[in-house]
Amino acid sequence: MKINMNKKISDFFQININDLEISENEIIGVMGANGSGKTTFLRLLSNNFKSSKNVKVDQNYSYCILQQISDFGLVKLVDLVIMFNNLNKKNIDINKFFDNYDLLPFKEAYFIKLSPGQQQRFKFMLIQLFKTDILILDETFNFLDSAWKNKLLNDIKEIKNNYKNLFIIDHDLEKIKQICNRIICFKNGEIVIDSKDVNSINQIDIDNILVK
């Protein structure tokens, strides 16, 4: 797909992307400082079904996003899983599904009652009930200890081939390198690094560009 975005977000910030080509089966690490435009870029991309002269994507895909901030209201976790399981015609063992992310004791709880790490695990668990063309993971490893970071990293490796493309926003270059075959880096709403040779990129290369 080809992506063009020239959209004013506020009086102080604009996204400018021209003729960005994304091929199927690319797993793209999206990096950049806070406020650089990476999350805005992916939100605009996933909303491309909305007509906008400033955001143009030449192909229509379905998207699923793991967002940093989620609000599931006053609905029990198990009811959310049952609802999305039925909507997407999955056939999961619900108790096993919860237990795989160490959340079985909390299945009758509300999302707001979970710790930040438990919330992150539940969100990752939930996205696997959706069948979409493209998966976007926005800082999936936040609030997780080392063991759970590695668990989710391995799970991403297992599910990545279920999607035409996978976008992963993260600040950890070494984790990005383990999953991705392309890295793009944002600064001030523009892409300043775009490389398919991910092993050639070092953190110092990114830092030097971002702090200038």
Image (spheres, rainbow, N blue to C red):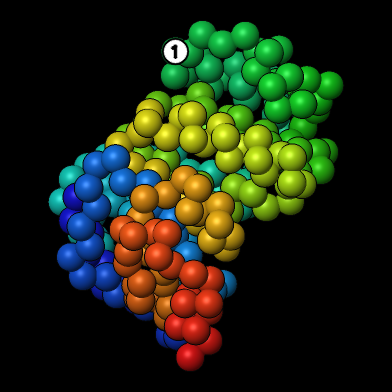
| Residue 206 position in % (x across, y down) | 48, 75
The 10 Å Cα crowd at callout 1, few under 14, some 14 to 19, many 20 or more, is: few
In the figure, 210 relative to 85: above or below? Answer: below
Instruction: Residue under label 1, please give it.
Output: 89
| Residue 160 position in % (x across, y down) | 42, 35
Q: Quadrant of residue 60?
A: top left
| Residue 112 position in % (x across, y down) | 77, 41
Q: Does the image show residue 57?
A: no
Q: How many marks?
A: 1
Q: Quadrant of residue 131?
A: top left
Residue at (51%, 36%) from the top-left corner? 156
Say whether residue 35 is left or right of residue 189.
right
Say whether residue 49 is left or right of residue 192.
left
Say whether residue 110 is left or right of residue 130.
right
In the figure, 154 relative to 190: above or below? Answer: above
Residue at (61%, 21%) from the top-left corner? 81
Residue at (56%, 32%) from the top-left corner? 155
- Please name whichever residue, 191 or 50, is drawn nearer the observer in this view of the structure: 191
Q: Does the image show residue 63?
A: yes
Provide the secondary structure element on which disc 1 rests: loop
Residue at (65%, 40%) from the top-left corner? 150
| Residue 67 position in % (x across, y down) | 56, 49
In the figure, 130 relative to 49: above or below? Answer: above
- Please name whichever residue, 110 or 124, is drawn nearer the observer in this view of the structure: 124
Q: Residue furthest front?
A: 200
Q: Amino acid at mark 1?
A: Lys
